[in-house]
Image (cartoon, rainbow, N blue to C red):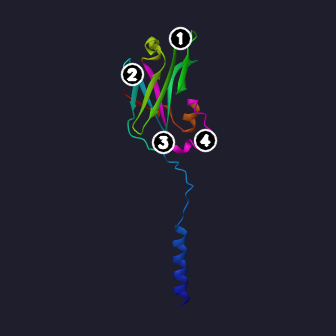
Amino acid sequence: MKKITLIVAFIGMITLQSCSNNDNNIDNDTISEVFEYTNVNFLPNDYRVVLIYPHSILSSDMVLVYRLSGSFQGEDIWKLLPETYYFDDGTLDLRYDFDFTRFDAELHLEGFDLAGVTNVYKLNQIFRVVILPGYFGKNSKINFNDYKAVVKVLNINESKIIKVQQ
């Protein structure tokens, strides 16, 4: 009888140890990605552009969009959207903004006289769409305005950026 009790106790201990309910796990294997779109043109029809992702993203993912606004001492300057420009004469203003789905990001220009805005702001633009797992937005101390800080925290190598043909 002692042997049977010992066997049942041993089986019970193994069974109870294999069960766990840890709902506080962070999904650290979700992969962050960056998609780069070149030669993006905002045309007079409605000054909107749809950037289609190479694959759908999760509904919990967040999207950040950066525009290449220039360079300084050989370093690219990436600005987070929405991005607003106010001109000195006060007659023109321009704003890049976006919204997104699991399948694409729609970028659009806003302003009072978009037809009068120089083509430097409308043609041959370069954008990077950064896909963030949803848990990065909660209690995150990432400075999302700083593109380099974002890709560093996400451990994204420049060689891993996916170039998407528009």
Dot 4 lies on which element? loop
Q: Residue 43's image quarter?
A: top left
Q: Which residue is mark 2?
A: 46
Foreground label between 2 and 3:
2
Q: Which residue is mark 3?
A: 61
Task: Tell me whether circle 4 and circle 2 mark residues in contact (CB < 8 Å).
Answer: no
Disc 1 from disc 4: Cα separation: 39 Å
Q: Which residue is mark 1?
A: 91
Q: Residues within 10 Å of mark 3 (few under 14, many from 20)?
A: some
Task: Tell me whether circle 1 and circle 4 mark residues in contact (CB < 8 Å).
Answer: no
Task: Tell me whether circle 3 and circle 4 mark residues in contact (CB < 8 Å).
Answer: no
Query: What amino acid is found at the position of numbered circle 1 in the picture?
Result: Thr
Mark 4 vs 2, N-terminal side:
2
28 on left or right of 107:
right
Answer above or below: position of 120 versus 101.
Answer: above
Disc 3 from disc 4: Cα separation: 14 Å
Query: What amino acid is found at the position of numbered circle 3 in the picture?
Result: Asp
Q: Which residue is mark 4?
A: 140
